[in-house]
Amino acid sequence: MRKRLSVVLVFVLLFSLVLSACGREDRGDFQVGMITDIGGIDDASFNATSWAGVERAENELGIQGDFLESQAQTDYAPNITQFINQGYELIVTVGFLLADDTAEFARANPDVSFAIVDFSYDPPIDNVRGLVFATDEAAFLAGYAAAAATQTGIVATFGGINIPPVSIFMVGFESGVNYYNAQHGADVQVLGWNTAENTGVFVGNFESTDDGRRVADELLSEGADIIMPVAGPVGLGSAQAVQEFGNAWIIGVDTDWTVSAPEYANVILTSVLKNMDVAVFDTIEMASNPDFQSFGGETYVGMLDNDGVGISDVAAGAISAEVRTEIEALREAIINNEIDTGWAGYIAGLN
């Protein structure tokens, strides 16, 4: 009896392994190509974070992933063309600036699936999944923390290029500072962005660390002791300036800078997390399923509620325990739509 039971168990185990292998083989033939925006795959920001989602899919789903780097906007179309010609089933484009080329190639190639980070289409395109993020929610919390942590009463933010995925951080940040002022009777000023006037400081690129250093030096000289650069690798130049200046903080964006830029960990107040890796992995898992038909033009929205956005731990000693508790309460209030983080009103004001 025991021998028969052992034989049955071995059969069940072998059968399970066969099924598992079949599942890996199905997805192992699935090819995903990712096209970076300018800044490169190692930008410690949105390109790198998006690629982390592809790498996770390689490890967990067994898919085949590859990337092409864009050195200029003129590279977008040739890069997409290369992946299409090579028969890739899913093409992920990273960045708002790739929207036009992604739409053109998606419409011309309805049998290829696409996903784009930081954009969604209206009207939707059936074979494209938009991946957008309510980073105003997380930036609001970072702004609140910054207002509580500043010693000079002046904080700052600036952007790479004036596009919605950048300005949404800045709107949320200023809203968080203003909310702290209202709650605590404070008068913390924000340099580099004014939502009411729709004006701000932008360096015009996402690559130049020299620009990041220059702007940070200017903001520090104006009295800011906390700076949030929304500019990809540009912000690393700002972090260096803050570190050398002393008695100041930097706020990272997109990823936890204590992990992606640990050399600046001692001056990182917090980071506004934009979990693009989670969204990209979820998209690949969906598209590589043998039963997958089409995205149907759907849009993924990363929010505090689904951990699509968030903030990393605020540096020890930078804010009081009471403010930490307030930030946790604010997070829940935002999730419950009890607090306006500014973006909806800002967009409405532009129309």
Image (spheres, rainbow, N blue to C red):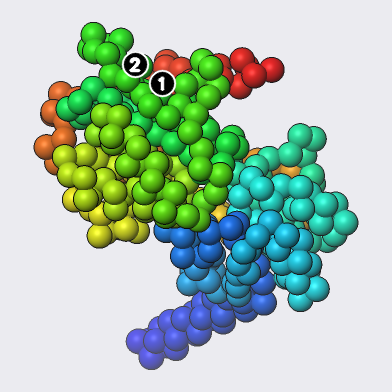
Q: Amino acid at mark 1?
A: Ser
The location of residue 172, given as percent across then percent down, is 44, 27
Amino acid type at image mark 2: Tyr
Q: Is residue 18 above or below residue 201?
A: below
Q: Quadrant of the C terminus?
A: top right
Q: Secondary structure at mark 2?
A: helix
Label 2 packing within 10 angstroms: few (<14), some (14-19), many (20+): many
Residue 228 sits above or below residue 241 on the image: above
In the displayed structure, would residue 105 be above or below residue 64?
Answer: above
Residue 127 visible in this rendered orientation of the protein: no
- Residue at x 24% of width, y 34% of height: 225
Spatial CA distance of label 1 from label 2 is 6 Å
The quadrant where residue 220 appears: top left
Q: Are marks 1 and 2 in contact (CB under 8 Å)?
A: yes
Q: Which residue is mark 1?
A: 175
Q: Which residue is mark 2?
A: 179
Residue at 53% across, 17% down: 197
